[in-house]
Image (tube, rainbow, N blue to C red):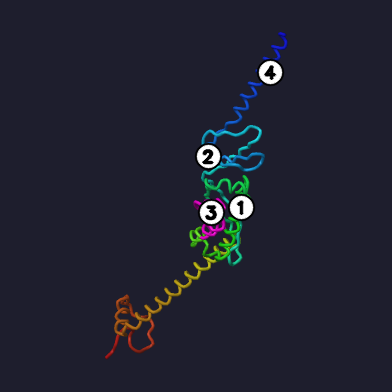
């Protein structure tokens, strides 16, 4: 009799513990900036918000999805319209629309970044930059960023993704192009230097012509007399003395 009572007590305690742990497993918490996708035997039955929530033990599974802003950086190599290679780094800030979490999960599961966002963004980056020659890339980088942003936002419209911002944060040209640019700058600088030297020589020549034209014979003789040391030449072949005019 006492053995049966002991067994019953053990069974009761086990049952109470089982109910206790099942009760604990029935409740779960959704943090701020998250949503819970509730699946019952693999079928989506609801999306729950922040706070403490209930699920049926053994039947329900909860997938946590973030609706906070996400920052995605893509580094890729693209070609310009003149077939030059540009390495670009693009930063995208996006979030999942809290009202469309269920739709996003049903369509893309937990991996929307790799199934939708990355391939779509890479495609738009390549398509937009391919319309610009490499020499205009730096000057029009803000315009290119804006166009990529618009093209990407239009492509993912209706998917449950909200695009917050998109910027080209860094870029680099190929070594061959950088060398070509440097050689071009050196050549342009050399051409400018040669042009400046030629213009200076022309101006100096013109100035010399004007100066020579303005010097009359009398002025030249006066200048020569001013420089004469007063000594007569040791040899004189006849004619008038230098610098002396006989009237």
Rate crowding at label 2 as few (under 14), some (14 to 19) or many (20 or more) other CA atoms within 10 Å.
Answer: some
The answer to whether residue 45 is left or right of residue 190 is right
Q: Residue at x 55, y 48 (%)?
A: 100
Gap between marks 2 and 3, in whole Å? 38 Å
Gap between marks 3 and 1, in whole Å? 23 Å
- Dot 4 falls on a residue whose secondary structure is helix
Q: Residue at x 65, y 35 (%)?
A: 59
Magenta region:
147-172
Q: Which residue is mark 4?
A: 11
> Eyeballing the image, is 45 above or below 215?
above
Gap between marks 4 and 3, in whole Å? 67 Å
Gap between marks 4 and 1, in whole Å? 53 Å
Gap between marks 2 and 1, in whole Å? 24 Å
- Dot 3 falls on a residue whose secondary structure is strand
Which image quadrant: the C terminus? bottom left
Q: Nearer the viewer, mark 4 or mark 3?
A: 4
Q: Which residue is mark 2?
A: 49
Q: Which residue is mark 1?
A: 116
The answer to whether residue 233 is left or right of residue 137 is left
Kindly give the residue lying farthest to the front in the view shown: 1
- Image spot of residue 215 (x, y percent): 32, 82
Q: Which residue is mark 3?
A: 170
The quarter of the displayed image where residue 134 is located: bottom right
């Amino acid at each position: 009799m006492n053995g049966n009572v002991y067994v019953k007590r053990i069974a009761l305690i086990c049952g109470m513990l089982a109910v206790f742990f099942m009760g604990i497993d029935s409740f779960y918490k959704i943090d701020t900036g998250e949503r819970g996708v509730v699946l019952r035997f693999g079928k989506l039955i609801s999306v729950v918000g922040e706070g403490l929530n209930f699920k049926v033990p053994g039947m329900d599974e909860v997938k946590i999805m973030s609706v906070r802003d996400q920052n995605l950086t893509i580094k890729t190599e693209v070609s310009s319209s003149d077939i030059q290679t540009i390495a670009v780094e693009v930063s995208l800030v996006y979030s999942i629309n809290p009202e469309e979490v269920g739709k996003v999960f049903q369509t893309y599961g937990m991996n929307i970044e790799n199934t939708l966002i990355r391939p779509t963004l890479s495609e738009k980056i390549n398509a937009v930059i391919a319309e610009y020659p490499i020499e205009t890339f730096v000057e029009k980088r803000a315009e290119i960023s804006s166009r990529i942003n618009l093209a990407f936002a239009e492509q993912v419209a209706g998917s449950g993704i909200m695009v917050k911002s998109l910027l080209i944060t860094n870029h680099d040209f190929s070594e061959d192009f950088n060398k070509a640019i440097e050689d071009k700058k050196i050549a342009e600088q050399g051409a400018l230097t040669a042009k400046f030297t030629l213009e200076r020589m022309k101006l100096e020549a013109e100035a010399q012509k004007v100066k020579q034209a303005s010097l009359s014979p009398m002025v030249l003789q006066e200048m020569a007399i001013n420089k004469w040391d007063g000594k007569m030449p040791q040899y004189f072949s006849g004619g008038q003395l230098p610098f002396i005019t006989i009237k």
